[in-house]
Amino acid sequence: MDNQPRANIDQDTLWNGTGGHAWVRNQATLDRMFAGFEPVLLAPVAAGTAQRVLDIGCGTGAVTLAAARKMGGAGHCTGADLSTPMLDLARTRAEREGIHARFLRADAQTYPFDGAGFDVIVSRFGVMFFDDPVAAFANLRRAVRTDGVLRAVAWRSPAENPFMTIAERTAEPLLPPVPPRAPDAPGQFGFANAQRVATILAEAGWQDIDIAPIDVACTLTEGQLIDYIGWLGSVGQRLLSVDAATRTRVIETVRAAFEPFVDGNDVRFTAACWQIDARAGHRSIPVSAPR
């Protein structure tokens, strides 16, 4: 990775710094919260087979390890991510479970993956951050065999995901201002425009492109909510640099705003996402319009 062309420098800095450490600290919370995406992402992975699976933006390894479990040790799973702290935890988890999986510190936009070395590429919220998404998806296409498949999930619009934006909106009067999100910029909602995503994939050489809306039920415990507010997202990152009194005031205010999502000991919300499917190959096939 260190010898590859430099790209996505802002993301590299974030995920090897405070962002990556926050995800490591909250690994159990995030894995529980996003567990409902595993069956969606792993549908192209056949149980008990020797497929070769590449997980892009693997983070602390949940999807990579789930793919390895599904194949029962017959397949070969590789997780790729920019974040050294998250990859360290992923390797520890694999060793603890006795799961054979490889984890690479790799920028998927530039890393020289083995040509046609994979059958399936999956990604849980890991493909919205590229500086040059066409170059990134072209690089990923070269990594899969002819007729290899891509299955990824990405967030739809902020308006459709109030749980993901309520902390930011509530904390706005209490914290220093941040620039508004630029439409289509790399970031959490960078793939909200499905037609743009379809165009990116087509320009990168993918075929049989299909982008469909999915709504996935997500849960965390009420006890995990404070850590979610205090460490994750733009609010969590900004709270790292404020005084203790401000941190307490913001967390209390934001926690009250989450009350509509609290159901007893659980916190429940619906993640409004796109399921992104595509296939590598040589035939010229029209792009399917987002449904």
Image: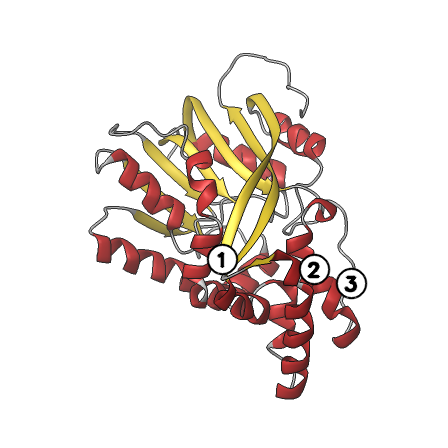
Q: Nearer the viewer, residue 181 or 29?
A: 29
Residue pictured at 79% horizontal, 73% vertical: 173
Distance between mark 1 and mark 3 Cα atoms = 29 Å
Q: Which mark is residue 179?
A: 3
In what element is the residue under mark 1?
Answer: strand
At label 3, counting other C-alpha atoms closer than 10 Å, the crowd grade (few under 14, some 14-19, many 20 or more) is few
Q: Mark 3 or mark 1, which is nearer the start of the sequence?
A: 3
Q: Is residue 200 left or right of residue 46?
A: right
Q: Which mark is residue 220?
A: 1
Tag 3 and tag 2, C-beta contact below 8 Å: no
Which x, y percent locates residue 235? Answer: 65, 68
Q: Nearer the viewer, residue 29 or 89?
A: 29
Distance between mark 2 and mark 1 Cα atoms = 16 Å
- What quarter of the picture does the C terminus occupy? top right
Please indicate, yes or no, whether residue 75 appears anywhere in the rendered image: yes
Which x, y percent locates residue 232? Answer: 57, 65
Q: Nearer the viewer, residue 250 or 277?
A: 250
At label 1, counting other C-alpha atoms closer than 10 Å, the crowd grade (few under 14, some 14-19, many 20 or more) is many
Residue pictured at 49% horizontal, 35% vertical: 140
